[in-house]
Image (cartoon, rainbow, N blue to C red):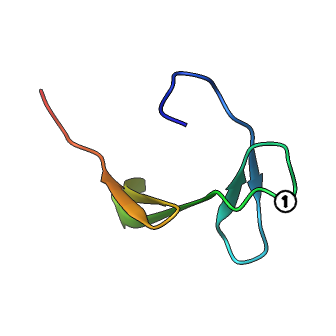
Amino acid sequence: MGDGDEQMLTQLPDGSFRIGADERSPERLRFDTVIGGTATRATHSGCALYRSFTP
């Protein structure tokens, strides 16, 4: 991730997503902090990523 390639997301029972097609992949993505129906934060394998709003 981060290199511009698209990766498949597979939803897991705990609400997070596995990144990539390999079932052994430890990479996880979780969306939270929803404001107005839009997630403003995602956690990628423990690293918080924030959506910024610019006009």
Q: Is residue 28 left or right of residue 52?
A: right
Nearest to the observer: residue 7 or residue 35: 7
Residue 19 position, x and y percent, is 69, 49
Residue type at mark 1 is Arg
Q: Residue at x 47, y 33 (%)?
A: 2
Instruction: Note whether 1 is above or below 24 in the view shown.
Output: above
Residue at numbered disc 1: 24
Report the residue at 67% width, 71% height from top: 15
Q: Is 38 placed above or below 28 here? A: above
- x, y percent for residue 40: 33, 55
Residue 4 in the image, given as x and y percentages of width and height: 52, 21
Given the current orientation, which residue lies at the most extreme bottom position? 14
Can you tell which quarter of the image residue 20 is in? top right
Q: Residue at x 19, y 39 (%)?
A: 53
> Is residue 29 shown left or right of residue 8?
left
Quarter the N terminus occupies: top right
In the picture as drawn, the residue positioned furthest to the right comes out as 23
- The residue positioned farthest toward the left in the image shown: 55
* Front in this rendered view, residue 23 or 40: 23
Name the quadrant containing residue 29.
Answer: bottom right
Mark 1: secondary structure: loop
Q: Quadrant of the C terminus?
A: top left
In this view, 50 is above or below 2: below
